[in-house]
Amino acid sequence: MKKALILFLFTFVNTTQAQQVFQKKLLLMGSDFGITVVCQNDSIAQLRIQDAITEIKRIEKLISSWDSTSETSRINANAGIKPVVVSEELFNLISRAKLISKLTDGAFDISYASMDKIWKFDGSMKTFPSAAAIAASVSKVGYKNIIMNGQDHSVFLKLKGMRIGFGAIGKGYAADTAKKLLQSKGVKAGIINASGDMNTWGKQPNGKYWEVAITNPMNKHKAFAVLPLKRGAIVTSGNYEKYVVFNGKRYSHIIDPRTGVPASGIISASVFASSAELADALATSLFVMGVETGLNRINQLKNTACILIDDQGKIHTSNTIKLKTNGQ
């Protein structure tokens, strides 16, 4: 999914203060990452940043479907053949993914990786795929066919050719685990920005909350809102660059895993939650569920909120959001 640009607003303090903000940007998991920590000095900060990098690389190894030796690849290779015993960590991640699938009525589904790629969003598609082609493309998708055995921590994909993938949840999970590790090592505040999947903790050295400026999808060079980040994690996803138009209707590159048809109606979704993993999954789901159903579902969840922008440019917010727009 295309991650919308998000800008964290903070002030670097001078070196005479006890706590300072240190930041490093790099490529991890095939995406742009930013690691920000509040520490006493540069030497400590660099050690803690390296700790976070090592942890993120560990998560990548765990969930990679490109690495033939990973646990995820072994699950996929044995689809329709036999269960695969995996680590408790991966078992729990897949279990949580299934719970989110149930919560979203299948709008989120890690077995989306089984989907045949019949849609192209590079401008080359000229005709709408046939109903038969669409149905066939999702014939092996379905979270209910992921069989979990809690006794031996095994995972079994019932259908041959079925696959799971963590593209819509993996970077969020990596942000969460890196944050947890840094907290355990005494880092009192920071930001893990996993290509738009962000988790924060603590406050800036000046005592203020971290602030997030959310990009206006109608003008990527401007932010339409600035909010203090108190909930911990935020994920903003947008579909305003990758889409197709048929009969005057705009279809997102985000495919409904239940129907095989691209989502429509929403061009940007920002989700605030206690974890980046959950926010990541819900941001994807909201595109599929649509404005009305999506807002209703978010309003039923504790410590979770969202901002949606529809394809007409109208802003919709969940009940607990109060926007502070730029310039106000």
Image (tube, rainbow, N blue to C red):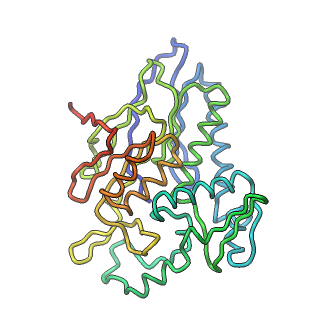
The quadrant in which the C terminus is found is: top left
The picture places residue 190, in percent across and down from the top left corner, at 53, 31
Q: Is residue 58 above or below residue 146?
A: above
- Residue at the (28%, 52%) spot, across then down: 309
Q: Is residue 62 above or below residue 18?
A: below
Q: Is residue 12 left or right of residue 307?
A: right
Q: Nearer the viewer, residue 17 or 128?
A: 128
- Residue at the (39%, 49%) spot, across then down: 298
Quarter location, residue 211: top left
Q: Nearer the viewer, residue 107 or 265?
A: 107
The picture places residue 225, in percent across and down from the top left corner, at 28, 39
The picture places residue 73, in percent across and down from the top left corner, at 68, 67
- Residue at the (48%, 40%) spot, across then down: 233
- Farthest residue to the front: give it: 300
Quarter location, residue 325: top left
Q: Is residue 201 above or below residue 303?
A: above
Q: Nearer the viewer, residue 164 or 195?
A: 164
The quadrant in which the N terminus is found is: bottom left
Q: Is residue 249 left or right of residue 203?
A: left
Q: Is residue 39 above or below residue 213?
A: above
The picture places residue 95, in percent across and down from the top left corner, at 63, 57
